[in-house]
Image (cartoon, rainbow, N blue to C red):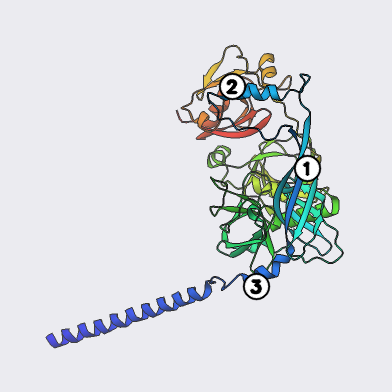
């Protein structure tokens, strides 16, 4: 019996050893496969640098600025006991011999940047902020001793891109745009430019992240840890095939130097902008004519939506959308066959659409989808009129407290103080408790609530009725349309007591 038990244990032991060996073999195979798939660091970037450097340029701009005669002025520390003495001294010396002010003299201010040639006939791409306001733009080439003067073909401040042109007796070496959309986080990239005026400097790194937004409506930045410093602005970010997949534009830094967080506007954006600047000397973006915002979880709940995808329409001024029948509270689900996930994506998609084209816009209204045909206008031609005021809103009579806010119907004095159009209706927010959800979500004194639960409100009774309807309908929150200086946005507030 003991022999049989020993034999059984031996068999189990052999089985487990074989099983473990099999697992280890599979793990080793997978690890080897993963190592084979991962791309190692290039042995050297020298060949790539040698290939693309002739197409990268240094840019020197000159601007004539006014300055006072008398040479440099001393720097006086604020709060210094000599501050008042030196200020009086300087003011006396700025007067001419006859008591008048000395005449202004002109001086030339210089700035440095980078760029790259995109055609043999001399088109050059750089940042708009590199050449903005310049009286003279000089281009220095990697393999030429002479400098060429450039003229501005067109600029796009929205994407910070500028197109220049130089005249050369010989064809210029140039580089082409690559596809930034296929770049992956972790891919190798190389930046070339003129950092801190050092000229034709190369740095390498990886794509740290894609689709970064900084401040513009059309932002699509590639984030990289390749060293980018002042002077790199306008220079190219290359993939390993020597194609430009970004234009180095900005850095995030507490001290002004590179800490490994740089941003390059993606070639997917730049290529389209350059085509328009080359053809028209300006950009021509599509314009739908709506104000929109993202759909948060609480807004989705307040509207009874199953998803936060789409863009919520907060206002429809005069323009293509209004003519086509799009309304406030509509949710735009798709534009010209492209699904809309958020408001930023919709802005970029509309901007890329041809001016004057007729596109199908799918909306969700009252729980039902509808497709509307809209003929796009040109965004650059659309002038947004907004009225601002520095006055504090005057308090209307008989304010009421609701949802942590002191509210009152608009009257003529409040409309005037808030810069509203005569006859505009709604509830003015006179005061708000700072420990409330309304304050946390950005509502402030001076705002105007014009809708609640997708219904207009002109009185406290209207608002109370909308809150009651939402509660009776089983809603956990109510959706308010709040306007500030004419700009609308939706805010969902909880109905829980």
Q: Looking at the image, which residue is at 62% across and 71% down?
A: 46
| Residue closest to the far left | 2
Asked if one can make out residue 360 in the rendered structure from this viewpoint, the answer is yes
Disc 1 element? helix
Marks 3/2: CA distance?
61 Å
**Residue matched to label 2:** 84
Reading the image, the residue beneath label 3 is 47
Precedes in sequence: disc 1 or disc 2: 2
Between residue 321 and residue 446, name the one nearer to us. Answer: 446
Dot 3 or dot 2: first in sequence order is 3
Who comes first in sequence, dot 1 or dot 3? 3
Is 418 rendered above or below residue 327?
above
Q: Using the image, determine if residue 255 lies above or below residue 469.
A: below
Q: Residue furthest front?
A: 97
x 64%, y 21%: residue = 88
Q: Quadrant of residue 274?
A: bottom right
Q: Quadrant of the C terminus?
A: top left
Of the two numbered discs 3 and 2 in the rendering, the one whose residue sits closer to the viewer: 2
Is residue 356 rendered to the left or right of residue 303?
right
**Tag of residue 379:** 1
Tag 1 and tag 3, C-beta contact below 8 Å: no
Q: Is residue 447 depicted above or below 356 in this figure?
A: above
């Amino acid at each position: 019996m003991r022999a049989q038990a020993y034999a059984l244990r031996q068999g189990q032991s052999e089985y487990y050893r074989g099983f473990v060996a099999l697992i280890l073999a599979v793990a080793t195979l997978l690890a080897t496969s993963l190592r084979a798939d991962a791309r190692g660091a290039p042995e050297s970037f020298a060949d790539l640098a040698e290939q693309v450097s002739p197409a990268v340029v240094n840019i020197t701009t000159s601007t004539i600025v006014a300055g006072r005669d008398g040479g440099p002025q001393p720097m006086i520390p604020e709060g210094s006991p000599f501050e008042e003495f030196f200020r009086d001294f300087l003011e006396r010396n700025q007067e001419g011999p006859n008591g008048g002010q000395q005449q202004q003299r002109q001086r030339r201010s210089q700035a440095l940047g980078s760029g790259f040639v995109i055609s043999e006939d001399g088109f050059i791409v750089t940042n708009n902020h590199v050449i903005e306001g310049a009286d003279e733009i000089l281009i220095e080439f990697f393999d030429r001793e002479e400098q060429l003067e450039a003229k501005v073909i067109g600029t796009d401040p929205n994407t910070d891109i500028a197109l220049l042109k130089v005249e050369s007796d010989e064809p210029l070496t140039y580089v082409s745009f690559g596809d930034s959309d296929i770049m992956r986080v972790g891919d190798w990239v190389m930046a070339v430019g003129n950092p801190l005026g050092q000229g034709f400097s190369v740095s390498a790194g990886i794509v740290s992240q894609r689709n970064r937004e900084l401040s513009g409506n059309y932002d699509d930045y590639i984030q990289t840890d390749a060293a980018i410093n002042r002077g790199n602005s306008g220079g190219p970010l290359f993939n390993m095939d020597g194609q430009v997949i970004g234009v180095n534009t900005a850095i995030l830094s507490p001290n002004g130097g590179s800490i490994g967080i740089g941003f390059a506007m993606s070639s997917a954006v730049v290529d389209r902008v350059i085509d328009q600047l080359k053809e028209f000397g300006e950009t021509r973006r599509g314009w739908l004519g709506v104000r929109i915002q993202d759909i948060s979880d609480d807004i989705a709940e307040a509207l009874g939506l199953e998803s936060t995808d789409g863009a919520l329409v907060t206002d429809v001024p005069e323009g293509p959308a209004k003519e086509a029948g799009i309304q406030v509270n509509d949710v735009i689900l798709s534009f010209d066959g492209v699904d809309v996930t958020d408001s930023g994506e919709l802005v970029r998609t509309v901007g890329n659409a041809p001016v004057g084209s007729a596109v199908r816009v799918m909306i969700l209204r009252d729980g039902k989808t509808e497709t509307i045909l809209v003929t796009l206008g040109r965004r650059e031609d659309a002038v947004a009129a907004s009225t601002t005021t520095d006055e504090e809103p005057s308090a209307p009579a008989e304010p009421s407290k609701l949802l942590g806010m002191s509210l009152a119907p608009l009257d003529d004095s409040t409309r005037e103080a808030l810069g509203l159009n005569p006859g505009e209706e709604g509830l003015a927010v006179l005061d708000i408790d700072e420990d409330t959800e309304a304050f946390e979500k950005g509502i402030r004194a001076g705002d105007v609530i014009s809708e609640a639960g997708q219904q207009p409100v002109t009185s406290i009774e209207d608002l109370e009725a909308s809150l009651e309807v939402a509660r009776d309908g089983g809603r956990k929150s109510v959706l308010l349309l709040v306007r500030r200086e004419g700009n609308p946005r939706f805010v969902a507030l909880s109905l829980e007591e």
